[in-house]
Every structure is written in structure tokens, then in C-alpha cells.
Image (cartoon, helix red, strand yellow):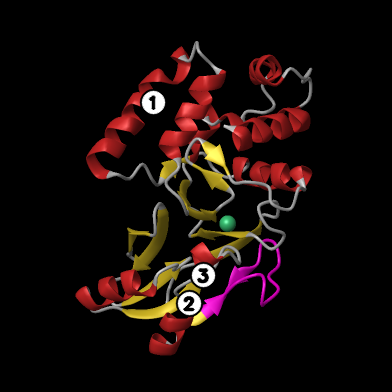
Amino acid sequence: MKYTIVALRALKDNYIWLIHDDKNAIVVDPTEAHVVEKYLQQHNLALKLILLTHNHADHTGGVKVLYERYNPECIDNFSQQLADGQILKLTDLDLSIKVLLTPGHTLEHVCYLVDNKHLFCGDTLFGMGCGRVFTNDFVAMYSSLSKIKALPESTLCYPAHEYTANNLRFITSLDSNHAYYQDYAKYLLMKLSSTQNSLPTVLADELRYNLFLRCDDPHVWAMVSAKSGELINDEESCFVALRQLRNKF
Ligand SMILES: [Zn+2]
């Protein structure tokens, strides 16, 4: 199936991702119904499916109105129970959607991998960052991020918020000698100033530059030790300390 993926901006910094084949559409985390409706009407699309990554109001706000108006199928892991690796069976839409259970931000958080290429990762992975661990289960969050790390490097990641600029400021505050990602940071900031949109991001870049995916790197341990005052010498404590530094930033 040939399809297009569109970024719709909502609220202050949310993304609603919309996938369509010029006829049928899927939306991920439709926080504001009117934003989705406007696009559907302008492009004469039928909404067939809503995918929800988790049950936070800034992701689900538009569901009720869209459901009443278009009667799409709705998939989530808080009113339903999905299984890790489950392939969703869809009517009308010829693409494959695989569920990845990714607890940590919330207990029921899931990511959706479309055609083994496009990862809709909600509030688990952000451009140059990761989501807050509201469950306090840092081990679960770290293993969810490790699941994403294990995907092919060419995977395109579609987070639900535009936090890249803030995340870059955070990384710079830890690492004054940030020569290794200067060019990438420049590229991101240029993209943001011209389009206000740094996403999707390629997993290969996140693996190289996103510190939350580099907690197995002793250079990152040293950086986090220096900033937090804790002696870090394993990947999980590195992740916990890094996320706590980000919370305070
Ligand atoms: Zn959330």
C-alpha cells in the first residue's frame, strides 16, 4: 500500500500523526478532533482507525468526537489488552501494524510499528530524549527503550511531542565538549527554525546522539557522574540518574 504520513500539530507541542492512502486514514493520539477533521475534510479522507499509545488527556482528547462522527476502529492497551509483538488485523487498510509493549511512562504504554519501518512511539522516545517515568519503574522504561534500540537503524521514529530543542539544551548542559554532535544539533535547530518540526527522527541518529539510548557507554557514565555527583558504573543507574537530571532541568 502506498501511503503518506502527515504531521498535524496540536496543543502547544503535540503531534497527531496521520497516515493516509488518499482514501482512508489512520490517526495516532488525536488530542484535538478539529485538527484531524479539518485535514480529513480538506483531503476527502475516511477515518478508519485510531491508535492510542497511552491514556493521557493530551493524547486522547479528540477520540470521543472523532469516534461519534466517523465510527473508526479504536486500538489501545488500557481499555483493551494488547500483546507484545501482536500484529493488528485491519479491515480496509493494507498495512501491517505491530504492537510493542513499552511500559514506563505509563504502565499500559505501547508503540506501534507500521510496516516494520515507521515507529509511533508516543511518550516513550523523543528526539534527543525520552519520556518521564510516571510509573517510577525505571527498569521497565529502560527495557522499553532497549526494545526500540533493537529495531533496524533505518526505523523512522514519530514521537508525540516536539521536545527536541529543549532536549538539546539539556544535553549541552551536561556535555560542554559536545563536538561529536555539533553538526547534528545545528541541522536539527535549522530544521526547527524553518519548519517548526524536527520529526520524524531516524533511529540511527538517536542511537548515535540521544544520551538516553547511550546509557551503556562509559563516556556517558562519566558525564552523568560529574553532573549528578553519583558514581555511575552500570547502564541502569546511568539511565535513572540521567532521567532524574532531566526532570530537574
Ligand atoms: Zn503522556
Looking at the rendered structure, the secondary structure element under dot 2 is: helix
Decide if residue 1 is in sight here: no
* Gap between marks 1 and 3 measured at Cα: 33 Å
- Asked where in the image residue 195 lies, by quadrant, the reply is top left
Q: Is mark 1 within 8 Å of ligand 1?
A: no
Which residue was labeled with disc 2? 63
* Gap between marks 2 and 1 measured at Cα: 36 Å
Which tag, 1 or 3, sits closer to the chain's start? 3
Quadrant location, the C terminus? top right
In screen coordinates, is 108 left or right of 208? right
Provide the major secondary structure of the magenta segment: loop
The residue lying at 36 percent from left, 21 percent from top is 183
Q: Residue furthest top?
A: 177
The residue lying at 27 percent from left, 71 percent from top is 39
Q: Residue furthest left?
A: 42
Q: Is residue 194 magenta?
A: no
Q: How far across and down, in percent of the image, does residue 38 sit?
A: 26, 73
Quadrant location, the N terminus? bottom left
Which tag, 2 or 1, sits closer to the chain's start? 2
**Towards the viewer: 159 or 24:** 159
Position of 83 relative to 64 (above/below): above
Q: Amino acid at mark 3?
A: Thr
Can you tell which mark lies on residue 184? 1
Decide if residue 10 is in sight here: yes
Q: Amino acid at mark 1?
A: Tyr
* Ligand 1 quadrant in view: bottom right
Can you tell which mark lies on residue 60? 3
Q: Which residues are magenta?
A: 74-90
